[in-house]
Image (cartoon, helix red, strand yellow):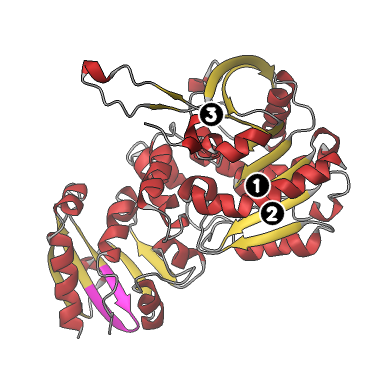
Amino acid sequence: MDVLWCETLAFKVNADERLVWRGRHVSTAFLLQVDQAEFVIQILAGRIAAVKKGSFPIADWVFALRANEAAWHEFLQPIPKPGFHDVMAMLKLKHLTMEGDLYPLMSHLLYFKDVLASVRGNEVTA
Amino acid sequence: MMDDSTSKNSTSVDSLSHHGVSAHVFVEPIVGRYMHLTFNGQHHRVYVEEAGTGVPLLCLHTAGADTRQYRALMNDTELLQQFRVIAFDLPWHGKSSPPEGWQNSTYRLSSKDYTQAILAVADALQLDQPIVMGCSIGGRIVLHLALEHPERFGAAIGLQSGAHVEPYYDLEWLHRSDVHGGEIAAGIVSGLIGPLSPVLHKWETLWHYMQGGPGVFKGDLFFYNADGDIRDRVKKIDTKKCPLWLLTGEYDYSCTPEDTAFLGKTIEGVTWQIMQGMGHFPMSEDPEKFLTYLKPVLQQALRARAA
């Protein structure tokens, strides 16, 4: 199931030419945590270059978004509940934490929001 | 051709078709002008627009935005038959200028400056007992106005009103030379729009944020997150002197339904409602749905103002 989710993220983003174009100045790697499972998503010029699952030392990612499976499950609903419909909402309501160097995220916030929302409707499983 | 719903307050221009321009031209009833006035010790060039005739309804935009958020209200035929709908861009916003010397200052909106700007515009337009309606920072300042200047207003309507909001991210991100100000402002507020809002209106709303000047959104948040804190005073608002209504969107995580509920429990005589499915910018993100909530409130406000 996790492999399917990873492939879906890469497929959805890379198939969206406009989204890739919006991220054309983004080359980074970020960590997505779902419960105890960690995924590192590598982005090269807006395109998802690789999605790796495992346990990663800090040097392998620039920033991290961490939430439990239940929170990501709510986030990925087609019409999420209030408070789970946006990463900034989840941050404020403490459903999610952000850490690391947030510059790539904040300088391309709309892009990253749409990267994550691209898998909306797909189950996230650790 | 226009339909009947728009023809009463608008102008059609059909004569352009022979120039290759579509005959379906629609000119909105909104008229804008620039006012020169002095407040807070400085000369200001302020953009004001209005439509309709009747009881003045003075509308206040959100932080980092401008009067365009009220475009739908100013095009609603039914509303314009009863109300003179007025909105102005705060200095630094929209088509209003920043004051002379702005390049040597850092913009920060204070409660006092915000109040004085609103009163100065109302005075300049000679508004008699206007109904004041504001959203977000505007929803906060109407609480200040209802408390400190109740005699000036026939009623007050707060949209996304809360007594205080704690910042939940580092506001420095909003004003950095190495981060595009328009992109970050839109990125910050995009989730505040309800997920069911029409795509057209969502992106129109975000476009307004993308057009804000450097540091203006951040400067407004000084009022929203710090100087405008009115938690310890809201219970003193006398709704007999200034009747007050509050409408808040369900999906707003900036000013939350719980924040508005606090006001509802604290202010005696206030009427409040949570708008299902809506976010932080009701008049701009989903105007058609918002008007179904607003119109009954406006009728109540009219009656209260006349009493």
Q: Are marks 1 and 3 in contact (CB under 8 Å)?
A: no
Is tag 1's residue or tag 3's residue first in the polypeptide sequence?
A: 3
Query: Residue B266, image x and y in percent?
Result: 80, 61
Q: Is residue A33 magenta?
A: yes
CB within 8 Å, label 1 to label 2: yes
Q: Which of the marked residues, 1 or 2, is nearer the chain's N terminus?
A: 1
The amino acid sitting under disc 2 is Leu
- Counting from the top left corner in percent of width and height, residue B58 is at 66, 34
Distance from the alpha carbon under mark 2 to that under mark 3: 29 Å
- Give me the C-alpha separation between circle 1 and circle 2: 8 Å
Prevailing SS of the magenta stretch: strand
Label 1 belongs to which residue?
B139
How many numbered badges does the structure rendering display? 3
Q: Residues within 10 Å of mark 1 (few under 14, many from 20)?
A: many
The answer, for residue B211, to whether it is visible in the render is yes
Residue B109, horizontal then vertical, whole percent: 61, 35
Q: Position of residue B78 (x, y in %)?
A: 60, 40
| Residues in magenta, as a range | A31-39
Residue visible at 27% across and 84% down in the picture: A125
Circle 3 residue: B9
Q: Which residue is mark 2?
A: B246
Marks 2 & 3 on one chain = yes
Query: Dot 3: what SS?
Result: loop
Q: Residues within 10 Å of mark 2 (few under 14, many from 20)?
A: many
Given the image, what chain letter belongs to the residue carrying mark 1?
B
Callout 1: SS:
helix
Q: Quadrant of the N terminus of chain A?
A: bottom left
Q: Is residue B159 visible?
A: no
Is residue B200 highlighted in magenta? no
